[in-house]
Amino acid sequence: MKRPIFFLLLLLSFSLLAQKSPEKLSYHLIKTDAQGKLLPWYDNDPGKSYDHIVNIVWKFWDNMRTDLNGLPYHMNHQVWKKDHNDSRGIGGDQIQMALSSWRLLYAYSGDERLLNNMQFMTDYYLSHSLSGAECKWKNLPYPYNLLIYSGIYDGDMVMGKGYTQPDKAGSFGYELINLYKITEKTVYLDAAIAIANTLSQKMEPGDNDHSPLPFRVNALTGKVGVMLIENKYEITYSYTSNWTGTMRLFTELIALGKGDTAEYKKSFQTLLDWMKQYPLKTNKWGPFFEDVGAWSDTQINAVTFAQYILENPELFEGGKESARRILDWVYQELGNPKWEKYGVAVVNEQTAYRVPGNSHTSRQGAVELLYASKTGDISAKDRGIRQLSWATYMVKEDGESTYPNGETWMTDGYGDFVRHYLRAMAAFPELSPSSQNHLVSSTSVIRRISYGKVKIQYDTFDKNSVEILHLSSKPISVLSGEVKLTEADTAVQHSSWNWKPLKEGGILKIEHQNETKINIQLIAKK
């Protein structure tokens, strides 16, 4: 009689041990705090973890192997394969997303290789992707390389040769302007103007079934893409709501006074009015991804617009409430409850592919933090941190950043990943490491920056700008050009700086006018 009892006790002990064993999420065992809430895998301190993640992800990209056609792997493929090459071309927004992330990461780190990669990608893409002057939709980049190793981008992954995606062109145009501001190379500005001209000329008011510009269009003929699905019904690619990049393109050119600014103002207003009248009211967010042929409402379109609303409150009456409704719609329509026991509200990619995503959940987290910074909503802040921490588990020790289903996408794991952590740090600078020095936000593009032990020096595109840095210790002085700025006791006013001490280090806020060059003295000169 003793042996059955012994075995029962043994089975019970194994069961209890199994219950206490941590669950594995992607590459790592899940870590939790005292309340059982998820922590990032690398370090319990989110600042240290997020910093580690963005750095190793960039290094993986920077060290990626070169293909036989002489191009880096990320210029040919959308999915990384360790032992062989993936058979698909690049993602539709792959280069644009990388430019977006690397620009922010450069200001954060000062790594010049980021600028080199940005210029290489842009120069190559401009010289190998644009629709010709004979096209009805001219001077727009094609989003896909149909013949993988041709080195030519000449069409759309679903529709084939000659088709382009105007929303991706608008996003690329916006990043071209940012690169122009960094480098002062007018070739980037000229290309952005050419893209803006075509998009502006093709702009229409739109309605519930047609956005002001179509999602897929034949650049040569002007025919909107149509596909027959299962020989039963047609899908017309006339709708998407991914227009924040295009709106930013227009507003940037208007601010610079470049191109046909009168037409850009009209086109911007057309897009803004349509976004308010339709997707903001209907939650019909529509497609984004290059590899999906069916209709799909995507989280990226919805939450990117929520971010735009929060960043441009002057354009939206009741903007905070509108942004909150968008974020809540995502949880209702695309929420994934699998990790709720760890206090994490994970989100799925889109209605046509209800799979949790690293880029999508980190985007949700970054915008929750932006919302929290604008409203003081503590629950949104906690939710955003958990979401970003969950997404860190998708990153391997060597920087390979993998989708939860096992594929390492050049978009979701890199360009559309790193920027969400940096935007989170901009919303709450304490989410960067307290033992280091980093610029986490600026109202102007950072053209050059260097981090030294004695001083930090940077140059902004605009003479009037506000920067926020998280520093390990209070600086001795701040110079704007040759002028020593005064230290303000509370809020920064005009040309001055303010120091907000934290438990470790603190937050430096600088406002400067009529000058682009800033010098922060960290320690006394010997």
Image (tube, rainbow, N blue to C red):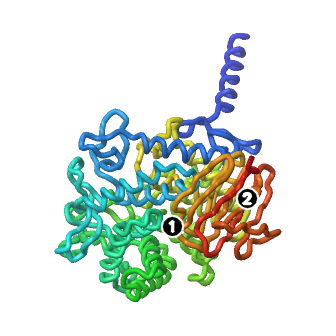
User: What residue is disc 1 on?
Assistant: 304
Labels 2, 1: front one: 2
Q: Can residue 141 be seen here?
A: yes
Task: Please tell me in which quadrant of the rendered image residue 428 appears.
Answer: bottom right
x then y, percent, for residue 439? 63, 57
**Residue drawn at x 40%, y 80% as measured from the top left:** 258
User: What residue is disc 2 on?
Assistant: 507
x then y, percent, for residue 362? 55, 55
Q: Check the image and name the residue furthest to the top.
A: 2
Element under disc 2: strand
Dot placed on the residue nearer the N-terminal end, 2 or 1: 1
Label 1 neighbour load within 10 Å: few <14, some 14-19, many 20+: many
- What's under tag 2, amino acid-wise? Ile
Q: Nearer the viewer, residue 369 or 32?
A: 369
Answer above or below: position of 279 versus 364: below
**Residue drawn at x 71%, y 62% as measured from the top left:** 478
**Residue drawn at x 58%, y 68% as measured from the top left:** 516
Q: Nearer the viewer, residue 298 or 454?
A: 454
Mark 2 to mark 1 CA distance (whole Å): 27 Å
Element under disc 1: helix
- What's under tag 1, amino acid-wise? Thr
Quadrant of image for the N terminus = top right
Task: Please tell me in which quadrant of the rendered image residue 197 appears.
Answer: bottom left
Q: Nearer the viewer, residue 388 or 181?
A: 181
Q: Can residue 210 be seen here?
A: no
x then y, percent, for residue 69? 24, 43
Label 2 neighbour load within 10 Å: few <14, some 14-19, many 20+: many
Q: Which mark is residue 180?
A: none
